[in-house]
Amino acid sequence: MENRNSYFKPVIVNTDFYLQFFPAMEGGKSLDIKEVMSYLNDMGYQNYDMRELNEAVKASEPVEVLIGKSEGNSFNEKIIISLSADNMLVRCRFYPAAEGRKTITKEDIADALLHEKIVYGLDTVLLNSLMQEREYCTEYLIGKGTPPTLGRDAKIEYYFSTSKSLKPKHNTDGSVNYHDLNIISRVEKNQLLAKLIPSEPGKPGKTVLGEELKPKEVKNLKLSYSNNIYVSDDGTELYSEVTGHASLVQGKVFVSAVYEVPADVDNSIGDINYPGNVLVKGNVKSGFVIHANGNIVVEGVVEGAQLYAGGQIIVQRGIHGMGKGLLSAEGNIVIKFIEGATVISGGYVETESVIQSMVSANTEVIVSGGKGLIRGGTIRVSNKVSARVIGSTMGIATNIEAGIEPKKLEHFNQIQKEARSIAKKIEVVRPILVNYSEKLKQGIALPPDKVEYMKTQVMTMKTLQAQLAPITEEINKLRMEFISAGRAKVEVQDVIYPGVTIKISDVSVTTKSERKYCQFVKDGADIKVMNL
């Protein structure tokens, strides 16, 4: 067959060895000089005219180049075997024999493969066809290893809401639809909660050298659950034993039964401390306390009461805190209105109005629906505050702080107090030690009791300094973190009035005039006002 690619052929004239070069046909590939050099090196030739060889490789007509003497070489047809770096592919190239010399046989190819220890994945059909016809200086892929097949990691499918960031559904006017809340996962008795899809191990592969390739290890999982749950016979499904609320905490499924209060939480009920969820059909009267490891849902009003939830808090009618009401939830808080209360959320807070209250949320505070009003008090978030109206025409002091997680800010304030307290103690001891040092410099001897006293003061100073050092380091670290927390923003969907102080990270500004449809963002060392 014709050779489309450029190739070379050994030519023997008397005792001289030449290489004859043939240019590529149309569409064929040109020779790489490195391939020629490799061939000659295998044949034992290192001394040749490199310039002539380069010119011959690039020539458009057949040319011959004298390489050296021919003694000691067979110049039979050759096969060169090459392996990929991962031993998964085996390729070969053929080089022609000199005139009258031996052509390659099946046995020659078998010997070459055996020499390279290739025992697996050979394309015997292609090898047989290459015995009939082949091109020279052309690469053939004659074998492939088998890669290991990927297995499948185990996974668990949950049949209740596992997202802590779900927002409640809203009515057309923007208010929360308390009849269709999707942020608490109510489950019925015998409801399927979770299903384990077992892992499937991969199959091993093999290189062309016959080496086994182990498949990647698959990830195995197991169902983790708490009380009020039963497991299917095959151990792959979880079902609820009771009607209640389901939640997923650090990979563990919980179902909490609901403690239902049919009317108000008052003197007839007393304080509530329940390991599951609490549903109050009426109001929570002033002075009473509810502790729930799960969610708390109040269909009425919370007065000057305190509610603590390990999950979420839902209050359909709002809170009249009277300066002493408190809502504290590890999860989100959704409430009609907040007035004269403290509200602390580990997630977000959504409400229709906030009046003279302290509201703290780990992510955002959304004041939408109804009046969408924030008036008076302080709002603290790490991400975003969004409201229709902020402040009032009366200039009531309203503070919005964004860009710092409230818990971190509280911790920051606490350790600052500790640092100041230790610093005061140090300032009490310092002049005593300075005075003692001055007396030593003057050569004044102190009585033994004074010396012992000074030793205790030195130890006190060292102890106080050791206590202050890590606190100071943490204060500086948090301070830098607050400075960099500049992506937070405050959105005004309608109007913001004068007298509102907005602090984003370490920068603050107090509004001097009324602004509409805008947002406040940090811009370097300033706060920038932008249109929505």
Image: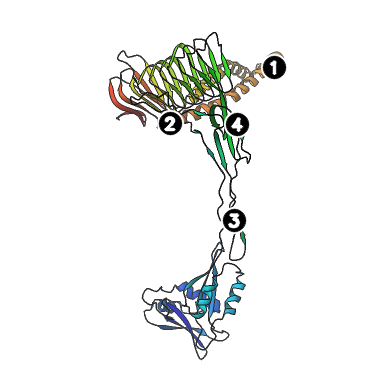
Which residue corresponds to mark 1?
A: 452
Q: Disc 4 residue type?
A: Ile
Quarter in which the C terminus is drawn: top left
Q: Disc 1 residue type?
A: Glu
Q: CA distance from mark 2 to mark 3?
A: 48 Å
- The front one of 256 and 517 is 256
Determine the secondary structure under disc 1: helix
Q: Earlier in the sequence, mark 1 or mark 4?
A: 4
Q: Nearer the viewer, mark 2 or mark 3?
A: 3
Dot 4, how many residues are within 10 Å of its Cα: few (below 14), some (14-19), or many (20+)?
Answer: many
Determine the secondary structure under disc 4: strand
Which residue corresponds to mark 2?
A: 485
Residue 46 appears anywhere in the view = no
- The front one of 64 and 190 is 190
Q: Position of residue 75 (x, y in %)?
A: 54, 84
- Residue 229's disc is 4
Q: Disc 3 residue type?
A: Lys
Q: Nearer the viewer, mark 1 or mark 3?
A: 3
Give the farthest residue toward the right: 448
504 relative to 153 in the view: left or right: left
Dot 3, how many residues are within 10 Å of its Cα: few (below 14), some (14-19), or many (20+)?
Answer: some
Residue 65 vs 501, above or below: the answer is below
Q: Disc 2 residue type?
A: Ala
Contact check, label 2 and label 3, Cβ < 8 Å: no
Dot 2, how many residues are within 10 Å of its Cα: few (below 14), some (14-19), or many (20+)?
Answer: some
Q: Earlier in the sequence, mark 2 or mark 3?
A: 3
Q: Nearer the viewer, mark 1 or mark 4?
A: 4
